[in-house]
Amino acid sequence: MADHNLRKEAYLKLTVNSVKGVTSWEEVKKLEVPKEALKKLNNNS
């Protein structure tokens, strides 16, 4: 269970382990998201 609630339209940075899956996450500002990732996110809207 999450330690706190997420904001709507929040951006997350995930740490992923190939065996365990997502092991941690943190909320980041839009400016911290790589431009290529933002392009892909915007194309899926």
Image (cartoon, rainbow, N blue to C red):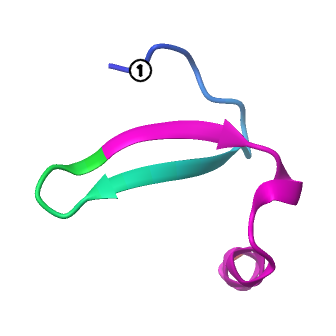
Rendered residue at 46%/14% (across/down): 3
Rendered residue at 57%/37% (across/down): 26
Left or right of 29 on screen, residue 9: left
For disc 1, the marked residue is 2
Rendered residue at 48%/40% (across/down): 25
Q: Give the residue at the far left of this rendering.
A: 19
Q: Give the SS element for disc 1.
A: loop
Instruction: Say if 16 sits above or below 39 in the image.
Output: above
Q: Position of residue 45 (x, y in %)?
A: 72, 75
Rendered residue at 11%/58% (across/down): 19
Q: Position of residue 21 (x, y in %)?
A: 22, 53
| Residue 37, quarter of picture | bottom right
Left or right of 4 on screen, residue 8: right
| Residue 2, quarter of picture | top left
| Residue 6, quarter of picture | top right
Report the amino acid beneath label 1.
Ala
Q: Is residue 2 magenta?
A: no
Q: Which is more toward the observer, 31 or 43?
A: 31
Q: Position of residue 16 (x, y in %)?
A: 33, 56
Which residues lie in the magenta part? 23-44
Instruction: Say if 41 sits above or below 21 in the image.
Output: below
